[in-house]
Amino acid sequence: MPIALFALTLSAFAIGTTEFVIVGLLPTIAADLNISLPSAGLLVSLYALGVAVGAPVLTALTGKVARKRLLLSLMLLFTAGNLIAWQAPSYSTLVLARILTGLAHGVFFSIGSTIATSLVAREKAASAIAIMFTGLTVALVTGVPLGTLIGQHFGWRASFLAVSVLGAIAFFGSLLFVPAKLRHTPPAGIAQQLGVLTEPRLLLVYAKTAIGYGGTFIPFTFLAPILQQITGLQSGAIAGVMLVYGVSVAVGNIWGGKLADHRGPVAALKIIFAALTAILLLLYFTASSPVAAIATILLWGGFAFGNVPALQVYVVQQAERLKPEAVDVASGLNIAAFNLGIAFAAWLGGVIVEHLGLLHTTWIGALVVMLSLWITFINGKLDRKAGVSVHFHSQRPQTH
């Protein structure tokens, strides 16, 4: 595999770290900037909103820009956003920094797969994409707990400085090793993307993605304060819990993909959403016990991101059947749906924390995921009505 691919992987690692590291730092940021936990939670919402807007809109608008130039511009924007966060004098400046980095994130993952495949021979395309996306998995397992640890010991600003350094290294790696001339097909325009949103079956999948993935983020956004205030863990232990969660997520993501391949996406999602509903309800009862809470969080990680491969392959299957001319667009809009789900969930979590209390994010999150389970049963019924096989073939794409 060419060294340029590892520059992309490092970029994915830096971006994955900055997206999720804030979850472990929320109590620290809230205390330092003298803001409420719900206000701190909006830093998760607004980042995800930046990704949701950046992925479809900015990718379409930058379709004619040379890939290397666009890639370098994105890493500059990403690094600048994190440097602004590092030096942010106020909450409003930190909000701006998060939106900027979110915009860079959205476009990077829209174009990253096509750049990765253009670097290798056609028969190695899937492996190239898989290598790039390991950056995200490794970010959850190592980057997020390490960033949380840095934030706990040197202040939350140091975490953003560390990610800025990663962004700068990724920029220079791409500058030196990514070829200047990369083949690329300009992405679909905004009009074609909006055309996908006229298909009711695809809209139902996007709703399921946003609700099901978002539901887990209602308690996940506030995991650090839950562990400190309800479970009674010291702030220094949060990084360790994030590490345990990250390892569990990495295993669960692979398991979720294999389950979707073996059982079909609808059957896999019924299992995963049912399990997530039960686990989030369980957390309501175990959160006050350190051992039980950590065991529940370990179990949660195993299912939390396991729905991603099944959701993504399902939208591709539906698009191949209903909008074959716009499969890539349909897949990209599902990425936007994931992030709209995160944005809404982090905001709703903040409202729950403010009016009901931290612990109530768990059972309300479970009810939201249950709604997605109900939509999954509707999907299965509609597929049977349309005479669609649950195992109709599609290559399972990499996602974020």
Image: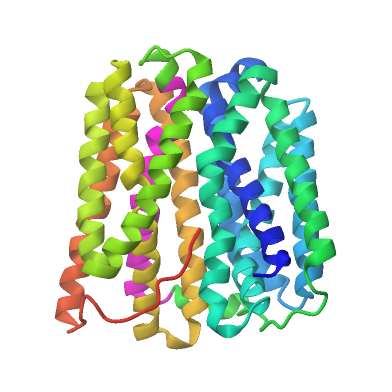
Point 59% across, 67% down: residue: 56
Percent from the top left, x then y, of residue 361?
Answer: 34, 30
Percent from the top left, x then y, of residue 103?
Answer: 67, 54
How many marks overall? 0
Q: Quadrant of residue 310?
A: bottom left
Q: Is residue 228 left or right of residue 68?
A: left
Point 58% across, 70% down: residue: 128
Coloration mode: rainbow
Q: Is residue 41 above or below residue 313?
A: above
Q: Is residue 375 above or below residue 264?
A: above
Give yes or no for residue 160 being in the magenta stretch.
Answer: no
Q: Which residue, as the protein is rendered here, is positioned at the far front?
A: 1
Q: Is residue 8 left or right of residue 51?
A: right
Q: Is residue 117 left or right of residue 333?
A: right
Point 38% across, 33% down: residue: 219
Region of the chain picked out in magenta, as a range = 198-226
> Would residue 121 be visible to someone looking at this image?
yes
Q: Quadrant of residue 380?
A: bottom left
